[in-house]
Amino acid sequence: MSDSLERYRSKRDFRKTDEPSGSDGSEGGDRRFVIQKHDASTLHYDVRIEADGVLKSWAVPKGPSTDPREKRLAVRTEDHPLEYAGFEGVIPEGEYGAGTVLVWDAGTYENLRRDDDGNEIPITDSIDQGQVEIRLDGEKLRGGYALVHAKLGGDEENWLLVKMDDDEADARRNPVSTEPASVLTGRSLEEVADDEGPDGGDGKEHD
Ligand code: MN
């Protein structure tokens, strides 16, 4: 079991939240990525990529862009367990990250970074070096994306998420606003909250 999940576990009470505890440590298969839309105290998109048996994670307030000219702030957050990629539901009031989560995009990714001899640079090394380059094969997002450690405002956790300029780049698309629903269940945030919140609702009325 990976020690890198210690921070993840310490923030959560798994008797109260349906989020996975990361106990099965399963590995293997294609490397996955997932982007979860998370309606917490502020709405954001959690970009997570599989590496070293966990999901390396960044919170992107504005969500990813398909326009290479758009640089999106991506705040590095704690590693999450692999099973978290399938989590869609409601984190209860009072718990860490309380709010509704849906799986906004999911798929596999390819590591694009190579050393001078053409060998793949492991993602964890790329993270240490502050330069991650991956090609996504998702339902909404495809093609190259770079995550660059920018330390904006001196904050060590601040990175930038930028679409690489390739065939999948498209300044006219804006999937964050035009394709808001879950790729897992087709539900909106409101529908997930109504289906899975306490007493089958989030306390708000939806027509
Ligand atoms: Mn989040």
Image (cartoon, rainbow, N blue to C red):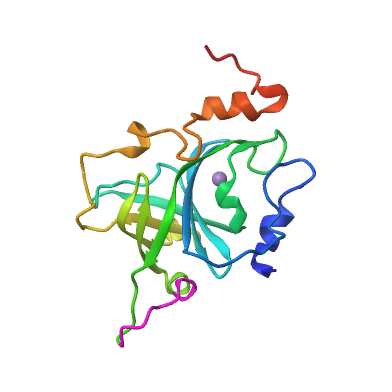
| Residue 149 in view here | no
| Res. 79 image quadrant | bottom right
The residue furthest right is 15
Residue 120 placed where, x, y %? 38, 78
Where is residue 173? Give x, y as percent.
25, 39
Q: Magenta span has 136?
A: no
**Residue at far top of view:** 207
Q: Is residue 147 left or right of residue 82?
A: left
Compared with 171, 146 (above or below) is below
Residue 39 higher or lower than 202, as above or below: below
- Residue 201: x and y in percent read 65, 22
Q: Residue at x 44, y 33 (%)?
A: 181
Number of on-image labels: 0
Which residue corresponds to the image point at 48% horizontal and 29% vertical from the top-left? 188
Q: Quadrant of ligand 1?
A: top right
Q: Depth check: give the residue in front, 160 or 196.
A: 196
Q: Nearer the viewer, residue 155 or 71?
A: 71
Residue 43 vs residue 195: left or right?
left
Can see residue 92?
yes
Outermost residue toward the front? 29
Which is more toward the observer, 90 or 69? 90
Pinpoint residue 142: horizontal percent, then vertical percent.
Answer: 31, 52
Above-or-below relation of 57 to 110:
above
Q: Residue at x 76, y 47 (%)?
A: 14
**In the figure, 195 relative to 30: above or below?**
above
Q: Main secondary structure of the magenta part?
A: loop
Residue that appears at 30% across and 86% down: 116
Classify the position of the N terminus by image quarter: bottom right
**Which range is magenta?**
117-125
